Amino acid sequence: MKTFKLEGALRQDLGKKASKALRGQEGIPAVLYGGSEVKHFTVTQEAVRNLIYSPEIFVIDLTIDGQATKAVLKDLQLHPVTDALLHLDFLEVFDGKPIVMEVPVVLTGHAEGVKAGGKLSLEMRKLKVKAPYTEIPEKLFIDVTNLGLGKTIQVGALQFEGLEITNAKNAVVCAVKLTRAARGAMAKGGK
């Protein structure tokens, strides 16, 4: 995974009023979980822009008042109307300790069903995997070359070395759907 450097400052005042005042000054309240203690800190909008609005996943070199630690972004809260960033949750990571993280899916190859007139549909853009953070790849590549018309690839059929996929086994990752043209061709071929 790529690394992202982020600096924050510890928060003294907690609660709704302090958080609202902080957001008014272009700050974002954040929390670091997973270590020996929970740390409440602040980061700036500008500092996290490239972390939040990116399809990539990152290991974050987080420095809070001079103390360095490694973390991953676990959750974020957005305003329901304006989509302004309201809050961030980070999880401290350690070598050898597994974490659960969503990893983007990339389809490779040219599916047989697409050659026959079908349409390839990606149903799950990300898969949840469990592994130590050092073993988690930036993307999961899935080969769809042998996928025929009307066929699907489910989570249970996928295996990646060193990773445990935690999504439901019968969830559909991608499918080749029949188009009207393919249905018409099949109907003519059947008569």
Image (cartoon, rainbow, N blue to C red):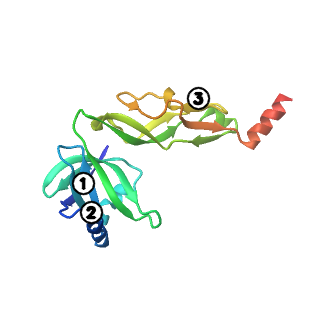
Q: Please tell me the numbered disc located at residue 68.
A: none
- Distance of label 3 from label 1 (alpha carbons): 41 Å
Q: Residue at x 42, y 63 (%)?
A: 79
Label 2 sits on a secondary structure element that is: loop
Judged left or right of residue 84, residue 156 is right
Q: Nearer the viewer, mark 1 or mark 2?
A: 2
Q: Residues within 10 Å of mark 1 (few under 14, many from 20)?
A: some
Coordinates of residue 180 in the picture (x, y in percent) = 75, 43
Which residue in the protein does label 3 denote? 146
Which corner quadrant holds the C terminus? top right
- Residue at mark 1 to residue at mark 2: CA–CA distance: 27 Å
For disc 1, the marked residue is: 5
Residue placed farthest to the left in the image? 66
Whether residues under marks 1 and 2 lie with C-beta atoms below 8 angstroms apart, the answer is no
Q: Which mark sits nearer the N-terminus, 3 or 2?
A: 2
Q: Looking at the figure, which quarter contains the N terminus?
A: top left
